[in-house]
Image (tube, rainbow, N blue to C red):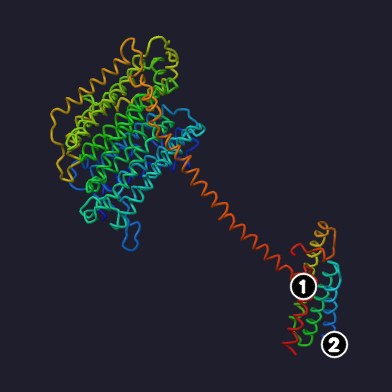
Amino acid sequence: MDIPFGYVLALAGIVVVLGMVCAVARRNLIMILLGVEVMLNGAAIAFIGAALRWQQLEGQAFVLFIIAIAAAEVSLGLALIVHLYHHTGSLNPEDYKVLK
Amino acid sequence: MTAAGPIDTTLVAAILATGMPFAAFVGILLLTRGWPRLSAGLSMVAISVSLLSAGFLLVKHWSLARPIEYSALWVAGGDISIRFGFLIDPLSLLMLLVVAVICFLVQVYSLGYMAGDAGFSRYYAFMSLFAWAMTNLTLAHTLLQLYIFWELVGLASYLLIGFWYEKFSASEAGKKAFVMTRCGDVAFFLGLLLILLHLGNLNITELNGPAAGRLSPAVVTAGALLIFGGIIGKSAQFPLLTWLPDAMEGPTPVSALLHSATMVAAGVYLFARLFPFFSLSPTALGVCLAVGTLSMLIASTMAMVSRDIKQVWAYSTISQLGYMIMGLAAGNYVAGVFHLTTHAAFKALLFLCSGVFIHAFHGNDMYAIGRQGGRRLRVPMVCLVIAAAALSGIPPFSGFFSKELILGALADLPNPLWVAAGLLGAFLTTYYTFRLTFIILFPAKGGPETGYSEDTRHSHDSGYRVMVWPLMVLAGVTVFLGFGEGEIARFLTAPTGATAGPSHHAWLPYAALSLCAAALFLAWFEFGRRGAAQVGFVERIAPLHALFRNRWYIDRAYRWLLDHVVYRVFSRLCARNDQKVIDGAVDGLGRATAGAGGLLSILHTGMVQYRLIVVFVSVAFMALYFFV
């Protein structure tokens, strides 16, 4: 393997931080969901790198699970968002403060 | 103490007698509600088995030396134990047979009377419920068991009085009966608690035995008076007597069964049951005697002016129950119980006869029944006269013997006031009984005899035939039961060993009979004579008439008490308490919670992304803390 494990971890960290910033900074529910997805992918990169580093298959199996969960989560999340949009006509998270 | 032997026929018979009606009740409610005939059949089979078992028990134990008890432990806690079981002694056996016979006859009669009613199955279910509760009440081994079934009997009474619940007056009467008897039952229950605290158990035999002698006289008096409160409620004595006339809203067979022959007699039965206990307290006996006398006289005056045939018998029931209580309170156990037995037969007969008239003429007014030709119904008319004679105490009918016994017991008392009251009661009883009989038998001329022709008779014919034969059985009992006086007295007193019989008063039968004759003549003169105005002497005196008609204003007094004391004072206080204290507390709690939430919500921004930042930052700090 040419690429050292440290680089892989760095890439994973960058992707996670990007996702974090996206989830926190964008004022749009869909973009928040997208940010969460990006963070999941960052975690998946770290898993893959670790699986290669220690030559274990469990890491790759975990990634398959993460992808499946992410798909399910996206479909559910999007459905919720569509429903919310129908109700309020807004995708801005600042408008959702009923509980306050 | 379980009995020896592999199969104890007594126990089996007792279980059958008390258990079968319950099986019928459950069976009808769960399975056969939709099939009226099947329901009636089920109920009849159950009560027949009960009747046979009761008869078997009585025959088997005709020369019973000492009471038989079966019991199992039901509640045990600390030094209090309550057992559940059967107590079989002459009193309970006699009462069981009376109950079973009357239940059986009334159920047969109801086949005709209730035919075609929409609630036929329900009626038989309630009848079975009543039979179950009443048979268990008679055989109860402890006072608590008796109390439980006492209340169940009250429930059955409520259900049956309000049987035609679409009628407003019927459901009102049911409620009234329920609430008024409950007033007495509270006293009864307090009495039970008092005895339980001081004696440690509620066994009837123990209460009647030497153990009760250890209690202090004050406790005995208080306990006896409190239990007597229950008797006042159940047996409709003064001052809780006004529920019984209203209870006549129920179907007539129900009135015959519950409100004359058996259920109201349960109060007197309880008195007889605890007779040795009551005897320990002369004060309590004095109070009982006074209450019995007062109810007896008041009720018979009310009966003198009523036009409603069933109400007359209701008042007369109150007054006869008063007689029984007088007899018991005067110290003559046999007199009270024997009058209870004979009264059950002839009063049921009176009600069932009236039921035939009411069924045929669709009305309760005795003048209307007389005008429409009530005397043409031969069998009920003859039976009515027999039962009326028994009620008045005319020999050779059964009422004569039992009433003589009670009057004899009263004459034994040192104060001649009681026997004078008893004789006055006998006079009034004869007067109002024959007033009703003559009004039906010799209707005033003028009105055409309408309503009841041969055609309607045929349409009623099948029901009529079913209804008539219980009448004949009861009439036979009424005629012949009196001659069994000696035997029954021996049977009742055998286990206690007490010798019955008051001292002989030679003048008493003559006095009683001449008063009866005088009353009979007066009734004939005013109501039976050709061309009589059919207006009683009471009705000519307006204030007296008003007093009797309005039931001595007892109901009015209750109404006033309710309106002015209960509603104005207690209800208002309770309402204010409810609004200010309870509602205020609850509202305050809610408002405080909402306010606290409002205060805390300042801390929240309500924006999901800020929370997310907080989560990320704290996770980052935790990572720094743990890994760096």
Task: Mark yes or no: residue B379 visible.
Answer: no
Question: What residue does disc 1 label?
Answer: B611
Q: Which of B235 and B419 is in front in this view?
A: B419
> B47 left or right of B484?
right
Judge left or right: residue B205 versus residue B150: left
Q: Position of residue A78 (x, y in %)?
A: 81, 64
**Chain letter of the residue carrying label 1:** B
Q: How crowded is mark 2: few (under 14 residues within 10 Å), some or many (20 or more)?
A: few
Which circle, 1 or 2, is nearer the viewer?
A: 1
The image quarter in which residue B364 lies: top left
Which residue is rendered at x = 36% and y = 27% of the image? Answer: B312
x and y, in percent, of residue B223 in the image? 30, 50
Q: Nearer the viewer, residue B9 or B612?
A: B612
- The image's mark for residue A7 is 2
| Relative vertical location of residue B526 with respect to residue B60 in this rendering, above or below | above
**Which quarter of the figure is the C terminus of chain B placed in?**
bottom right
Q: Residue B413 carries which label?
A: none
Whole-angstrom CA distance, mark 1 to mark 2, is 31 Å
Looking at the rendered structure, the number of numbered marks drawn on it comes to 2
Query: Label 1: few (<14), some or many (≥20) within 10 Å?
Result: some
Relative to B568, residue B511 above or below: above
Indicate the quadrant where residue B585 lies.
bottom right
Report helix, strand or loop for mark 1.
helix
- The amino acid at mark 2 is Tyr
Q: Amino acid under label 1?
A: Arg
User: Dot 2: what SS?
Assistant: helix
